[in-house]
Structures are given as structure tokens and as C-alpha cells.
Image: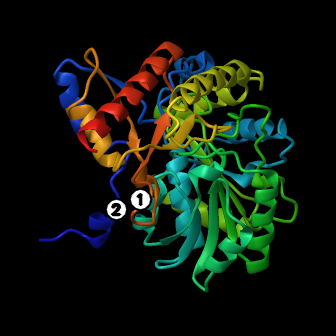
Amino acid sequence: MDISKRAKQIQESPIRKLATYANETKKRGIQIYHLNIGQPDIPTPEVFYNRVKDFSEKVLSYGPSDGLDELKQAMVDYFLKYNIALNKNDIIITTGGSEAVSFAFNVIADPEDEVIIPEPFYTNYNGYSSISNLKIVPITTDPENGYHLPDISEFEKKITKKTKAIMICSPNNPTGTVLYEREIRELGKLVKKHNLFLIADEVYKEFTYDGEKHFSILQLQGLEDHAIVVDSISKRYSACGARIGAIISKNREVMKAILKFAQARLCPPTLEQIGAIGAYRLPLNYFKAITDEYQKRRDILVEILTSNKEIILKKPNGAFYIMTKLPIDDSDKFARWMLEDFEIDNETVMVAPGAGFYSTPGKGTQEIRIAYVLETKKLERAGNILLKAIEKYNSLNP
């Protein structure tokens, strides 16, 4: 018996694929500083748990396939604070942002169709494109340019009869790049010109630094039929395990089709939606202390890493990731070596190798993604261990 081509071709997660080595490292009594996964250590809002505790229904029954009406209204109210006017029909609640990506891919394209995505990109886009049997057409961005988009002509060159959409993520995972408003406006014009969809993963939109502001594709006038937004509470409210996301669009045909996919999986989790209602009703100043903390962590890590002049790193302005190019030969080999053969005072660091965030073979082999989700003292220690690891590794692999 044989398994499907889809199962053979789906990519391993660069974030999780080294977990087996990490477990063996911990068994040897070595502490690992986990910079590989975007799991915030910021406490989940207390109101989230309180609303779940207050749930008093005798039966935990199926909910609506498109999500609880009260949660959708809470989201409408929330987005209005950013001067983005939605109604409840523009929102379908999903089982995490990941399901929103899957729904978007399956609704806008058929097998063998193409979606253009700037790389590096969130690794699970590869996974969901494999499941949907779509082809990702990458547009490579450069660490030297802070991973900003190339000229819009580079996108237009990639458009074919099979192109159905352009997808972006801003603030970006894995790079932390916040796209400029002009970049997004240019993409908006391009998708209208070629009658394409523009899918935007905006799950990190609250986390911007140095006065940078996120610009949503929902703010583009005249793009209502083209714009699809992926949303999630995972990072916004430090509730990754709740698995509550959303897909947002004013295109009625798109939303009607997505509802059929939502019906096929019955409904998103009810208790977590109830908790999310309370989170969405928090005032916007809830994010002030959190963004200040993330900016402080980013600054600490950037200062440490840039002390090595061979490391290529542009300070990112959003999310809580840094994608950086190291003076090493192979980041997969380096990341595994740090777990298997390197430690300082029984401590080491785990990172996500960069190649897994690319679609183009051979790209990202010297890059790593770092999630600055540790408290400052641990982050400072991890950064210094990483520098020493680079020095040691290169002495062994001249």
C-alpha cells in the first residue's frame, strides 16, 4: 500500500521538526531557550478565562458554523476602533487562523492554480497549498532590504492565466517586516487590474514599533470584492491554544462559499469563542504595555546580534520575529548542532532554520527565524549563547 502524493510532498515545519532532538537534549539535563516558536509568554487576559468559567449551559452543543453571533459583533466593534467598518456578514469564525488560510485557498482557486506570495513566508502556507493542490509562486525578498517588497513589476511578471491571488502577511511572520502603505496600495491596484484576490494575513496587526502603523487591505477603497483577511486571537491575546480565528471579506460570493466549508467541519469551538468575546471587548490600551514589552525585547536582541558585524539584520518594526542571515554554511545543520553538540553551562538555544520559510529551493540556507517571546533576562542570555554558538560552529566548520 502507498500513501498519497500530497502526504509525501507536504513540507515539514521548520518550527517543529527539530522537536525530537530538543527532547533528547532536555533528557541530558540541558536547558533550551526556545526561540523557535511564536508562543508568547504574555498572560492570556483574565477576562477570557472568567467568561469560560461563567458558562452555565447544561449541554455544550454545536454552535453556528459561521461562529457565535455575539463574537462576530464584538469583532465588528473592535475593528471599528481602527476605523474599519464591518458587519457580521463579513466575518466567519474559524478554527484558528490556519483554517482561515485553508478556507481562502480552497475557495479562490482550483487544483494547479497559482497564488503569488512574497518569501520568506509563514511555513504553513506551504502546507495548506499542498493540501489544496495549489502552486505557490514565490517573490523573493532580501534581508539586506529588510524583506520589503520588490518593485511591483516583479509581481506582474509572475501573473499567468492560472494566477488567482496575491497573498501577503503584514506585520510579517517570519521577518517582522511591516509593509508600507504604498506597497499595499500598489498591490491593490495590481489585483484590480488583473481581477485577482488579495489575501492578507493580518494576525499581528496590533504589534508595531517605532511609530510604525499597520495598514490593512480593508482600508483600500474599491477593493471590497478582491480583499480577504485572515485574522486570529492566538497572538493578539496570547491565546494560541484556543484556536479561534476568522476570515473577513465583503465579497458575498466568497463568504457564501466559505460558509459551505465551515458547515462541513460543523462549528468552531464554543467555549473558546465565549472567552474571545471578552478579549475583543478589552480597550485598545490593553496592547500598550504588551507592545512596549515586545519592542524592548526586540531592541535587546537586535543590539546583541548586530554586535557581530557579519550578521545581516535590519531592525524589524512588527510582530515578534527576527529573520536574520548568519555567517554560517547551513542553518538546518547549525540548528541541529546546537541541540546535539553544543551547550554553555548546560544551556543552549533552539531556532527555526530559514529554508523552511521559502518555496524556492536553496533559499534561506543561511537564515534563521527567532521569536523574541522570552522575558528580557532569558532573551539576553539566549542571544549571547547564540553568538558564541556561531563562533564555535565556524571554528569546527571552517
Q: Quadrant of residue 178?
A: top right
| Residue 385 x %, y % | 38, 24
Image quadrant holding the C terminus, namely top left
Q: Are marks 1 and 2 in contact (CB under 8 Å)?
A: yes
Residue 10 image label: 2
Residue at the disc numbered 1: 127
- In the displayed structure, 347 sits above or below 109; it is above
Measured Cα–Cα span from mark 1 to mark 2: 6 Å
Name the residue rendered at 72%, 74% in the picture: 153
Q: Nearer the viewer, residue 393 or 82?
A: 393
Judged from the image, the secondary structure of the residue bearing numbered disc 2 is loop
Amino acid carrying label 1: it is Gly
Give residue 301's mark: none
The quadrant of the rendering that contains the N terminus is bottom left
Q: Looking at the rendering, which quadrant does residue 188 occupy?
A: bottom right
Q: Earlier in the sequence, mark 1 or mark 2?
A: 2
Q: Is residue 111 above or below residue 43?
A: below
Q: Position of residue 378 (x, y in %)?
A: 45, 16
Label 1: few (<14), some (14–19) or many (≥20) C-alpha neighbours in 10 Å: some
